Image (spheres, grey):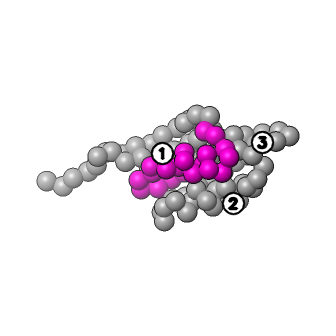
């Protein structure tokens, strides 16, 4: 089974939670997740961000649900890296 090991998302988020808390919440979804959040634009009520998530098996649905629970929305998946399941014979 193929596994997602890297996602780059364009996310529109409210000012709260702040970038540190937002990224921390996503990183806590799985013990091996690395999350990088870059704010690209600030508006009166929102922040446009690029979020890079790396891990051994990323579940997009779980990530998306967590983002939405924090009041944000995924605008697009800008990059994805997937590896196939390597089985020894």
Q: Is residue 89 magenta?
A: no
Q: Are marks 1 and 3 in contact (CB under 8 Å)?
A: no
- Residue range (magenta): 53-74
The residue shown at (37%, 48%) is 3
Which label was assigned to residue 61?
A: 1
In 3D space, how far apart are the residues under numbered discs 1 and 3 (Cα atoms)? Answer: 23 Å
Q: In terms of sequence position, does the residue under pointer 1 or pointer 3 come before the other?
A: 3
Which label was assigned to residue 46?
A: 3
Residue in the foreground of this view, choosing between 68 and 49:
68
Left or right, residue 25 beside residue 56: right
- Name the spot of residue 46 as percent of width and height, x first: 78, 42
- Name the spot of residue 14 as percent of width and height, x first: 75, 46
Label 2 secondary element:
helix
Which residue position holds label 2? 21
* Residue 49 appears in the rendering: no
Label 1 secondary element:
helix
Residue in the foreground of this view, choosing between 25 and 5:
25
Q: How many residues crowd around disc 1 within 10 Å: few (fewer than 14), some, or many (20 or more)?
A: few
In 3D space, how far apart are the residues under numbered discs 2 and 3 (Cα atoms)? Answer: 15 Å
Instruction: Single out the residue that lies furthest toward the bottom.
Output: 31
- Name the spot of residue 73 as percent of width and height, x first: 64, 40
Q: In terms of sequence position, does the residue under pointer 1 or pointer 2 come before the other?
A: 2
Q: In terms of sequence position, does the residue under pointer 2 or pointer 3 come before the other?
A: 2
Left or right, residue 32 beside residue 49: left
The residue shown at (57%, 51%) is 66
In 3D space, how far apart are the residues under numbered discs 1 and 2 (Cα atoms)? Answer: 20 Å
Q: How many residues crowd around disc 3 within 10 Å: few (fewer than 14), some, or many (20 or more)?
A: some
């Amino acid at each position: 089974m193929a596994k997602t090991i890297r996602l780059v998302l364009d996310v529109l988020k409210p000012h709260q939670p702040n970038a540190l808390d937002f990224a921390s919440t996503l990183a806590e979804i799985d013990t091996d997740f690395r999350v990088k959040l870059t704010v690209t634009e600030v508006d009166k009520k929102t922040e446009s961000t690029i979020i890079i998530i790396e891990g051994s098996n990323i579940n997009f649905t779980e990530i998306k649900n967590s983002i939405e629970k924090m009041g944000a929305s995924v605008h697009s998946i800008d990059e994805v890296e997937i590896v196939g399941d390597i089985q020894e014979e």
